[in-house]
Image (tube, rainbow, N blue to C red):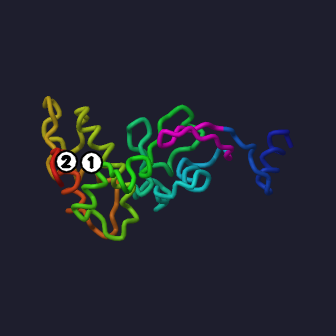
Amino acid sequence: MSDSDRGAAGRSQGETAPLSAITLSVNDQVRRLEVDPRTSLLDALREHLRLTGTKKGCDHGQCGACTVLINGRRVNSCLTLAVMHEGDEVVTIEGLGDPDDLHPMQRAFVDCDGFQCGYCTPGQICSAVGMLTEVEADWPSHATADVAASRITLSDEEIRERMSGNICRCAAYPNIVAAIRGVAEGGPA
């Protein structure tokens, strides 16, 4: 048995991998952690940093409940490792706004009743914020009617397509679309 085989066999019998020291920028705060290198960003946020707004739904990247913003782009935090985000700007639902100063998307979700049980709401809101950034950058989606247009028209179909990675088991979709539309149009939702 080679040394690498013995090392792998030892770890599989209860030993853990050596911890990795990482520094993350989360919600404009530098946070230092020691984590197993296999720790997902979701678990680092929830279990190590106690930022429990980001939800663990399916843990397979299929529901979107764990969506956060990394360098302004939406990412399923269950599908990426914490050690991969040294130097990145991570924003969770807690970093978008607070109860006394809600982010416009948070306010729109409240005003439009864009949630029922609320479990998916943090991921929906983070995804919606990232999605509007994509629209502003004129990134087309599968529903974009004219990919050569100078500006993307944000129809309800376009919003639904772009938000299709976020599942709401309570089916509050019409209200979610209304909230996003309200923010996109710059007026009250």
Q: Is residue 94 above or below residue 135?
A: below
Q: Main secondary structure of the magenta part?
A: strand
Q: Which residue is mark 1?
A: 162
Q: Is residue 179 magenta?
A: no
Depth order, front residue of 20/109? 109
Left or right: residue 11 compared with residue 28: right
Q: Quadrant of the C terminus?
A: bottom left
Classify residue 170 by image quadrant. bottom left
Q: Are marks 1 and 2 in contact (CB under 8 Å)?
A: yes
Q: State the image coordinates of residue 135 (x, y, percent, origin top left).
A: 23, 38
Taking the spot 13% from the left edge, 31% from the top edge, the residue there is 149
Q: Magenta part of the protein: which range?
A: 22-36
Q: Which residue is mark 2?
A: 158
Taking the spot 52% from the left edge, 54% from the top edge, the residue there is 51
Q: State the image coordinates of residue 59 (x, y, percent, origin top left).
A: 50, 58
Q: Amino acid at mark 1?
A: Arg
Q: Secondary structure at mark 1?
A: helix
Taking the spot 30% from the left edge, 54% from the top edge, the residue there is 164
Classify residue 62 by image quadrant. bottom left
Q: Secondary structure at mark 2?
A: helix
